[in-house]
Image (tube, coloured by chain):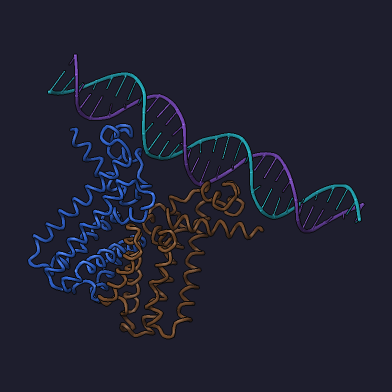
Chain colours: A blue, B brown, C purple, D cyan
Amino acid sequence: MTENSREKILLAATKIAQAHGYNGLNFRDLAEDVGIKAASIYYYFPSKADLAAAVAKRYWENAAAALETLSAESADPVSALRRYPETFRWALENENRMCLSGFMAAEYDDLPEAVKKEVQTFADVNVAWLSKVLSAAKVVSPKKSEPRARAIFAAVGGAQLMARSRSDITLYDTLISSYRAAGLLPA
Amino acid sequence: MTENSREKILLAATKIAQAHGYNGLNFRDLAEDVGIKAASIYYYFPSKADLAAAVAKRYWENAAAALETLSAESADPVSALRRYPETFRWALENENRMCLSGFMAAEYDDLPEAVKKEVQTFADVNVAWLSKVLSAAKVVSPKKSEPRARAIFAAVGGAQLMARSRSDITLYDTLISSYRAAGLLPA
DNA sequence: TTATACCTACCAATCGTTAGGTAGAAATCA
DNA sequence: TGATTTCTACCTAACGATTGGTAGGTATAA
């Protein structure tokens, strides 16, 4: 079951980091979640920085896969775009967690270099997908699709942050609705 | 100089919290910034929770005053609205800091109750001001001014978070421009 | 016999916090 | 006025808890 424990650690660490950030992630609580002792984590990860980097890497890889699935499942780019906020909603539904990269963006000053890199890649993956879909959907001119993609990513992240601080998922929904009403997202 | 030290503590603690959050704020580093010893902080604040609550309270009070000044200095509501993003830009200009309440919104789960309250008030103050100005500017129907106010607040906070994670203030500016282009903010 | 997948037991550093002290200014009293 | 007390604004030194991390052991299976 060697790979199983590594997976469990990665999974539990992701959940903790989404709720408490890099700073709030500690080996003893994490180990207890997994059902092992803190020292055993070092069998799989040489340091907290390495674990967090692995967590953040896995996080954007999963996000990239989820977005590809969303593209594939959608009949057209506009409907894929419409469903984009769902990917961020999911974290709030699960014990009021938030985007790992959003949390770590706040903690940016205190992050190990390797973790910073993966956090940025998460943003890059989202912006690239949004940009591609915006271009295909022709909601903005091709030239403006990347700035618009960044704006959508930032706004959705902000909505998640605000909703979390109220522990109110309906606030997230009304914020997304307002973005649509204002013209930032397709109606 | 009794009130002077209290002010210095509040000021230094605000700066630290804007860069490292509630979790990253510690009495020894804070005391060194002020030029006193850690134990001396307890002469002014009974606990870290009390200090942080005082910091967050002062933070939204200053924000409220700054917004009133902005209203008073602006010829009309639309130009006040246009200048709203400047208040969030200022933190980034100063050593890539971010909104204290934005950071603490991420850390929400681990915040003492008294601090949570003040963090929420900061959001309330911003939304109330935006709502009032939006109504006066008639950019949206009076009924839609509060949802739109919340959307602007969340989006600007998200832009700040994203720009901070890139240490790139020009990214903040382009995000705000995109919000204007999309119709979320007046052009 | 050797590698795997853990474990116990500890370490040094850091954390919020407390106890108890002290120099000097201010207030009180003779 | 001068002596004495009290208060202000800090200090040193330590506490127990928690942190990331290490050294070295061990049961199980190949």
Query: Does C7 sit above or below residue A154?
Result: above
Tally of numbered discs: 0
Q: Is residue B115 left or right of residue B153?
A: right
Q: Nearer the viewer, residue B179 or A44?
A: B179
The percent position of residue A116, horizontal first and vertical second, equals: 31, 50
The percent position of residue A169, horizontal first and vertical second, equals: 29, 63
Q: Nearer the viewer, residue B145 or B5?
A: B5
Q: Is residue B51 left or right of residue B184?
A: right
Given the current orientation, which residue lies at the most extreme left position? A75
Query: Does B174 sit above or below residue B183?
Result: above
Query: Does D12 sit above or below residue B87?
Result: above
Q: Nearer the viewer, residue B180 or D6?
A: B180
Q: Residue at x 44, y 85 (%)?
A: B75
Q: Is residue C21 left or right of residue A156?
A: right
Q: Residue at x 47, y 55 (%)?
A: B16
Quarter-wise, where is residue B96 in the image? bottom left
The quadrant in which the N terminus of chain A is found is top left
The percent position of residue C3, horizontal first and vertical second, equals: 19, 24
Q: Residue at x 38, y 59 (%)?
A: B105
The quadrant in which the C terminus of chain A is found is bottom left
Quarter-wise, where is residue A123 in the image? bottom left
The percent position of residue B36, horizontal first and vertical second, equals: 60, 49
Quarter-wise, where is residue A127 in the image? bottom left
